[in-house]
Image: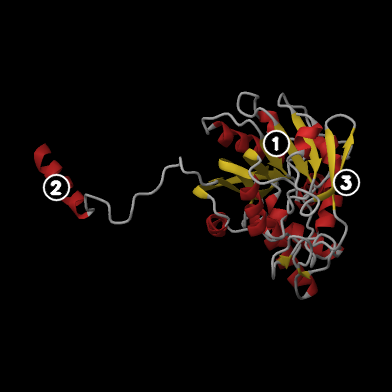
Amino acid sequence: MSCRGVQKLLQGAGSGPAGWTRTPATYCCCRFRSGPSRARSGPGTGSGPGSGSGSINVFNREMKRRQKNWAAVLKDGHQYDYLREEVGSRVADRVYDIARTFPLALDMGGGKCYIAEHLSKEVVQRLVLTDVSQQALKLGRRSEIPTRSVVADEEFLPFRENSFHLVVSSLSLHWINDLPRALSEIHRVLKPDGVFVGAMAGGDTLYELRCSLQLAQMEREGGFSPHVSPYTAVTDLGNLLGRARFNMLTVDVDDVQVHYPGIMELMTDLQGMGESNCAWNRRSMLQRDTMLAAAAVYKEMYGNPDGSVPATFQILHMIGWKPHESQAKPARRGSATVSFRDLAKVSRTGGADRS
């Protein structure tokens, strides 16, 4: 896919990027208009471009960009990719379950191309890969699908309406400040009858680590502050997709459990994944006594007989379709010709016949 072909998808300067630069290979950079944005503002109500009225600014997006850039250039960074590889393959499996070919797809927050490496050209013919991390895109894995990389914030998609037949996302939406608006943006860039297939961390992710840190901090410091980022509950996800005007929704949950030698190894791996906490109200440092107490609590409450400790990653999978007249529609209310009350009669009749 040519850089000019991708550029046609971009919005005009009045509502999208102010410039477009091509670098060597298949890499493009989207530079947004200068001005205040939620990624650079402090905690509180977002006031940047595209921020909804009263939207809550939970995460420091500039900090998350730096974390992902730092993680991408680690010499041994591949050893921290195991979770993204696993979830990316599961998202790809759900794309294969849809019996159609997608001429143009968008991987939102795709990083090193963890989904596309599991897809073929027979399913996705061309792909646009976006991420807030320039380094992750530069070091992306090769795929047989013609791919164009664009540096763009997932909160502000710089593409025209009705551009993509498929949008996928894996483990990036849980860092979005305004998730309802982000889902509406995905809906906007999809073509009618296009589909969104995504995966994000759910509310029970790392509950063992969260509980251990809170108990240790309360015991050693007399109170606690959040050290694990907040996540979306599965009970809210269907409502959020519905508010974004998706239909034929599917939401399911996977629990991925990884075992570590101890709490320090877990936190080191989270840092290597670029998944460190970036909430505005986070504490940058933990006291040594608190960390030692948390490690002891973790092993006491959740430890395995072999001395290792588990870490649970709750993965919320979602599928939503942009409405189109060709899609199946629910029957009109009151149009049924059989009552559920008649089912009991059928069951009793069948039992009598068998006897």
Q: Amino acid at mark 1?
A: Glu
* Residue pointed to by mark 3: 70
Are there few (<14), some (14-19), or many (20+) residues within 10 Å of tag 3? Answer: some
Q: Residue at x 78, y 44 (%)?
A: 131
* Residue pointed to by mark 1: 85
Q: Earlier in the sequence, mark 2 or mark 3?
A: 3
**Which colour scheme appears in the figure?**
secondary structure
Q: Amino acid at mark 3?
A: Trp
Q: Residue at x 56, y 54 (%)?
A: 241
Q: Amino acid at mark 2?
A: Arg
Q: Earlier in the sequence, mark 1 or mark 2?
A: 1
Q: Are marks 3 and 1 in contact (CB under 8 Å)?
A: no
Are there few (<14), some (14-19), or many (20+) residues within 10 Å of tag 1? Answer: some
Of all residues, the one furthest to the bottom in this rendering is: 222
Closer to us: 177 or 186: 186
Q: Are marks 1 and 2 in contact (CB under 8 Å)?
A: no
Q: Earlier in the sequence, mark 3 or mark 1?
A: 3
Q: How many marks?
A: 3
Q: Is 49 positioned to the left or the right of 242 in the image? A: right
* Residue pointed to by mark 2: 348
Q: Is residue 112 visible?
A: no
Q: Is residue 218 above or below residue 76?
A: below
Q: Position of residue 189 (x, y in %)?
A: 65, 46
Q: Residue at x 76, y 68 (%)?
A: 217
State the SS at label 3: helix
Closer to us: 50 or 286: 50
